[in-house]
Every structure is written in structure tokens, then in C-alpha cells.
Image (cartoon, rainbow, N blue to C red):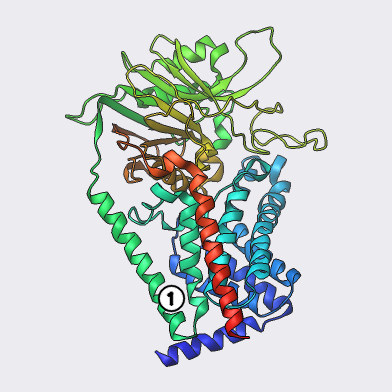
Amino acid sequence: MTGALDRVGRWRDRVSGLGGWRRRGTLALLGLLAALALPPLYLVPLLWLALPGLVWILNGRPGRLAAFGAGWWFGFGYFTAGFYWIGFAMMVEPEKYAWMIPFSVFGLGAGMAVFCGLTLLATRLLAPRPGWGQVLVLAAAWTAFEWVRGWAFTGFPWNLAGTVWAFSDAMVQPAAAVGAYGLSLVTVILAAAPAVLPGTAAARRGLAAAVAVLVLAWGGGALRLALAPTQFVDGVRLRLVQPNIPQRLKWAGDLRRGHVERQVEMSLAAPAPGAPPPTHVIWGETMVPAFVNRDPAARALAARAAPPGGALLTGGLRMPDDRTAPFQVWNSLFALARDGAILATYDKFHLLPFGEYVPFRQYLDIAKITAGRTDFSRGAGPRTLDVPGLPPVGPLICYEAIFPAAVTDPARRPKWLLNITNDAWFGRSPGPYQHLAATRLRAVEEGLPLVRVANTGISAVVDPLGRTLSALPLQESGVLDSGLPRDLPGGTPFARWGNGVLAPLVVLAAALGLWLARRRTAANG
């Protein structure tokens, strides 16, 4: 044991003494290693290399600018590696958008890295000395800036640190109480804990306590899963349709009708022998490539997929019903009866910058990457829809599902969540896996089942504890028939309090960290 600690100490001394480009390159490499812990690889043990290395490099050079720089270079490696797949979207029409790849990958990575830079700067200011106090302050600052990242500049809380546990149903259960941000807080504490080694016997006892927390979190989650078997809503049978239409063909004028006809054919296919027929059919985002409320022919064609007495739920475009109103476009979800009647409508409210609108349009004369130059209009916010034959549903379009505590109607809580999306933009990359992992965390937080339907996958049915009951693989065509899981009786603590639980947790971690840091400073004279 002593020999191992000595080797760790030598590595710490070597890393903390780096300077110049070696320091910056090592920080970026550590960030890249941390990104490998994210979906779909889930190489979580690499966090126990990346975060201690970050802490040691932070402590190797004094000064606020050096601290910010350490965090920025780490964040640049982390976010560039974690978001590189966004560049795939620019290759759907490379003649138009390939020039944007450096900005969408490296530019986004550089921008997001600022939050990591601020995290390390706060750590330097509040807890400059190594030890458990510094680890706790780091975790508190990391979590606080993840939360800021979730709303600043419209928000992009993608690849939160807590997402690394999405491979384990048991390990994500604490999110029912503390949410994804709270899960990040615990994750950073545990991952940065080896930075206290080699140290005193007290430091090693603290490390043992961190390991015990990890074991208890898994054990508690496993127990919660064992005590809550999945139950289903009586009389509801869903059919999820995943046609796997390539994005470059999705809006081709001469193919649009064929795309809809193909989905109708898949929707009407006979169920498996002995299985009940579907009562409701669900298609993905904009899978009716038309202004559904203004195009009776397209609506009637798609509505053939609706089972008798049930409905088709599908994504499509919407314009104002009043033909004299100013031109606007919404990315919407429609519930259609078999006769083509529109039973319910939901408009996406959290729009994707550069995908659905161009920020600072008055200064940037460029087209958004989705079809058409007109920016989409914003919907009214989270809503609960009533669709005949279904419990009240909370619809979410595309990346609306990645925002903790912002996925349900505050005035009327739904009984389940429906996420329709189109990840065809990102091909066979980590993007769809990361997207699914984030949506599963919403199910755990809210105690609500989640149904996810994606054009090219991954379509899935998730129960209110985040267990994936069935799924269609990425870039495969098919249908998935499933019952609708029931919501969790009584909901969850997070559903009641939302991110209101976060501030006390962050303050507690920071206060304990400051106390330990000052105690260490006093002990060292």
C-alpha cells in the first residue's frame, strides 16, 4: 500500500510541476479522458484519473489567471470531445454548412469551457490549499456552474457530470431526491477524492468514506428498484414507429409523401401473434413534413395510421390557423383522429440556437440549418395535453427533455412524458446515446414514465424509475409495441421541490469545504 501511495505522490508532483504547453496539453487530455466517462462508453474509472489530475495541476501554480486557465483547458478538452458529434449536423448539407464545423465543435467547446474556468477560479479563491476542503469547494463550484450553464444564453445542460451513471439503473436513483445536478455534486466529490492522496491517515479515512458513499448509493438504488416493480396503464397499447429516414432525404420534395405512406404502412402492420393491437401510434419529430393544420391532404394521409377510437401523435409544422395573420412557423406535436381531426396541439418552446433560430439575427445574416430561412416561433411553455384514451401527457420536442425541473406543466402535472425527436442529424455518433441518457434522468427525477420516439433512434419506453423496458436500436427501421407504464404514486421529492433542493446542497458542501480549508490553514500556521 505504501509503495502505491508513493507512486501516486510522484505522479502528483510530476503533473503539478508541468508548465507551458505541456501543462495546457495535459489539462486538455484530462478533459478528454473525463468525456470518455459519458455515454455511450461510460468509462467511469477514468474520472479517478482526470479530476485528481486537474486538482493537482491547479495546486501546482498560484494565481487566479492560472486557475482559470487550468479549468478552461480542461473544459475545452471535455466539451470538445463530448460535443464533437454536433459537427455531423453540418455535413447533412456540407455545401452550405461545412464551414460552420470549427465554430460548432471547437467554438462551442471553447465557450462551454468558460464555465470550467470559473469553477477552478472559484476553487482557488475559496480553498487555495490542497485537501478535503478544496475537493468539497470544487464540487460545489462545479455543480453551481453546471446549473448556470443550464439557463445562461437559453441554456445547454448537456453532459452533466451525473450523467456518467446512466449505465446503471441503481446509481441514478438518487436523482429522484436531488436531481441530476445533485448527482453531479456527489460524482465530483467522489471522482476528485483521490486528489487527497498521498496524505494523512485522516485523509485516507475520508477516501474510504467516499467509497462507502458510492457503495451505499448503489445499494440504496438497487433496493428502490426491487421494491417498485413496473405497472402499466390498463387498456393502452402504444406503437412507436421508427422509419430511419436519412436527414438528407427527409425533406426532399418528391419523397415526402412516400415517407408518410411508409410510416402509415408500418403503423398498420399486424402486431406480434397473441399481442393486443395498438390503441395509439406515435411518430417522431416533424415526421409529417408539412404544415399539418393547413394541409388537409397531408393530415388525412397521416391520420390513416390512427387506430379506430385512438389517435396518431406526430411531429409536424404549424402555421397560424388564421390565414390573414402574420407568417409564423412552429415546431409542433399533433394528436390526430382517424378522420383527420386535430385533437390536441403542442408547440415547442425551448428552441435550438442555429438549428431553429439564429441568435442576434440582426447581426448574423446566415440561415438556420433546418429547412427554410424563417426562424421558428416559441411555444407557450410546458403543457399537459389531453388525448382521448390516454392519461394526461407532457410533450417534449427534441432537446426540451434535457432540462431538469423544466419538463412538466407547473399548473397541471402530467401522468407521463412523451419526447419526440429527430437525431438523424447526428448519424451513428454518441449524440443520440447522450440524448437518451438525459431523458431517462428526467423520468427518475419526476417519477414519470417516458416514451421516446426518434426518426433514426433510439426510440424507447422508460418506466418512472428510469428503467428502459424496451428500445429500438440506433439507425434501424422498425416498430415497438408496448404498454404505457404508470407514474410513481406520490411522485418524487425532486418533482415537488425541483432545483430548490440544489441550493442547500451546494451551500452545505461549500460551507463544509470552507470550514475544512480554514481548519487546515490554521493547523499549518
Q: Position of residue 165 (x, y in %)?
A: 41, 57
Q: Position of residue 128 (x, y in %)?
A: 65, 74
User: Label 1 amino acid?
Assistant: Gly
Residue 33 appears in view = no
Count of marks, rendered view: 1
Residue 167 appears in view = yes
Name the image quarter holding residue 262.
top left
Name the image quarter holding residue 391.
top left
Residue at x 46%, y 61% (from the top left corner): 186
Q: Nearer the viewer, residue 164 or 338?
A: 164
Q: Residues within 10 Å of mark 1 (few under 14, many from 20)?
A: some
Name the image quarter holding residue 201.
bottom left
Q: Nearer the viewer, residue 104 or 397?
A: 397
Residue at x 53%, y 42% (from the top left corner): 403
Q: Position of residue 43 (x, y in %)?
A: 44, 65
Residue at x 39%, y 89% (from the top left corner): 1
Q: Position of residue 260 (x, y in %)?
A: 46, 23
Question: Which SS class for mark 1?
Answer: helix
Q: Which residue is mark 1?
A: 206
| 136 left or right of 326 in image | left
On screen, residue 200 above or below 51? below
Q: Residue furthest bottom?
A: 3
